[in-house]
Amino acid sequence: MARLKDKVCIITGATSGIGKRTAEVFAAEGAKLVIAGRREAEGLAVAKSIGDRCDFVKTDVTIEAQMKALIEFALRKHGRIDCLFNNAGGPSPIGGIETIPVEGFDQAMAVLVRSVMLGMKHVAPVMLNQRSGSIINNGSVAASRAGLSSSMIYSAAKAAVVHLTRCVAMQLGESSVRVNSISPGGIATGIFGKALGLSVEKAEQTANAVKTGLAMMQPIPRAGLTDDIAMAAVFLASDESSFVNGHDLVVDGGVIGGRQWTPHQESLRAMKRAFGIEG
């Protein structure tokens, strides 16, 4: 449908999962892509599968010089940048607060929060000069509700991402540059395996295994899919969302909407039985 025809889009964390699928969908919608990630072989394979409209730049998103180089590459090649999807992420320390290692906390904040700040810092001058552009940051439902991640540190980091998004949106919006976040619910990717300590390769083989459990998390009775997030990103990257700014687009099948209907009704029936009430 070419909703992103000739828009220049950068996607970080594009070697697998949400980032990879978003790159594929953006390409199908007509975008010119620069994708980034730490795993060079996987990144080059994704770019090759997409074709000539996609370049891969090996990037550690926690390192300012590398993020700056990524932005400069896209600008040098295409002359403009229309969208940056700060998607890169990773696991965070699990366990109670008394067990959290400081180095693990610092690394999680670097991957999940610093990377988003760096991406926005270095793409902002380009978009301000253009007086146009869309920045999309990957949040999480864990930013809004405790207990929706295996890691309280991950939840805190994503809360920072969502609020930083709003803060930057207030600044850049004055120059017609939009800044929004997407907060996925339970999406069937390898992130759960990574969070529990599996290697990257093994974790990415677990995506199908988690679908059954994820299907029971929310009213919509299926696991979230990478396509669900990719299509939300298409909307925010496209001109269709030209009046959307400072918004956290939750894509979760209803998981943070409240208590599910059927368990709620079952608990009411149990309460009636305890009170000796018929019906």
Image (spheres, grey):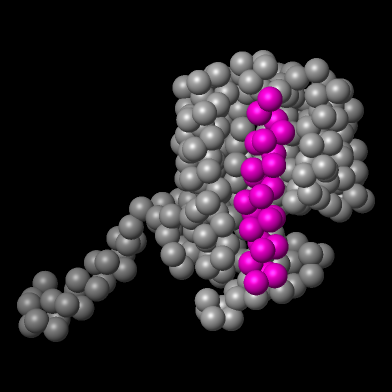
Residue 267 lies left or right of residue 191; in this view the side is: left
Is the residue 11 above or below the residue 193 in the image?
above
- Quadrant of image for the C terminus: bottom left
Which secondary structure is most common in the magenta stretch?
helix
Residue 178 lies left or right of residue 208; in this view the side is: left
Residue 84 lies left or right of residue 241; in this view the side is: right
Tell me if residue 21 can be seen.
no
- Quadrant of image for the N terminus: top right
Tell me if residue 279 can be seen.
yes
Is the residue 169 above or below the residue 262 in the image?
above
- Give the magenta part as a residue range: 102-125
Is the residue 119 above or below the residue 126 in the image?
below
Between residues 91 and 3, which one lies in front from this camera angle?
Answer: 91
Residue appearing at x 79%, y 49% in the figure: 63
Q: Quadrant of residue 105?
A: bottom right
In reply to whether residue 103 is colored magenta, the answer given is yes
Residue appearing at x 7%, y 77% in the figure: 277
